Amino acid sequence: MANEITHGDAGVPRRDFLLLAAGALGAVGVVSTIWPFIDSLEPAADTIAAGAPIDVDLAPVKPGQQITVVWRGRPIFILRRTPDELKELQSPSDTTLLRDPNSEVDQQPEYAQNWHRSINPEFLVVVGICTHLGCIPMFEPRGSALMDASWPGGYFCPCHGSKYDLSARVFAGVPAPYNLPVPPYNFTAKDRITIGENPKGSDWDFSSVEQI
Ligand code: FES
């Protein structure tokens, strides 16, 4: 699976990049917010680390804000998109930039195989690990000083320059081959999700994604 994959760059094993990515988690707060309000008092932290689902309260997340939580040791980006951003995601000015605009590669459950790659269009939930060699992309909204004037907003991986839009769909012509994966999750209330569990009626298996 993913840990066996190697890509260019002198054949550096992907797992080494994943370790670097884990080490870099402490720097994520520079560009987004590490969310302190994961609601799981139970189960215990070591059980969560082993893969138990986590509950996240989305109510405090403001439109345009991204937070980062950790599930199964991986950063999970949660972005609350604005109406303007949702409109842009459906525009040819965005979709013509993308390698897989319709999410045809299995990088998400069936309930997120749509233009917004989510259950509720307002909230994007994705694994924040670049599909090139495993660095952690940075959230860069439109107008970011780091990007040029044509940047529509999205994610930028500084390791080798891969870009993703605000649905975490990868741009064409960059090193990363796939859209960022969507983990299993479901809404347990209007603004509350459980990451690690599918909605009722779905038995989607996270290990079936093409690449983490
Ligand atoms: S790890 Fe190479 S571009 Fe992201």
Image (tube, rainbow, N blue to C red):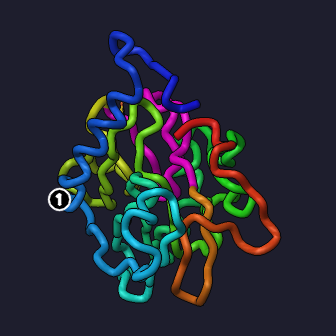
Q: Quadrant of the N terminus?
A: top right
Image: magenta residue range: 161-182
Measuring from the top left, give residue 171's x and y in whole percent: 49, 39
Q: Quadrant of residue 210?
A: top right
186 vs 116: above or below = below
Residue at image coords 40%, 72%: 44
Res 141 quadrant in image: bottom left
Q: Residue at x 38, y 55 (%)?
A: 75
Q: SS for tag 1?
A: helix
How many marks the image carries: the answer is: 1
Q: Residue at x 50, y 42 (%)?
A: 170
Residue 35, given in percent of the width and then of the height, sits at: 31, 73
- Residue at the disc numbered 1: 30
Magenta region includes residue 48: no
* Res 196 quadrant in image: bottom right
Q: Specify the quarter for ligand 1.
A: top left
3 relative position to 156: left or right: right
What secondary structure do most residues of the magenta stretch adopt?
Answer: loop
Q: Nearer the viewer, residue 116 or 105?
A: 105
Number of residues whose C-alpha sits closer than 10 Å to that of mark 1, classed few (under 14), some (14–19) or many (20 or more)? few
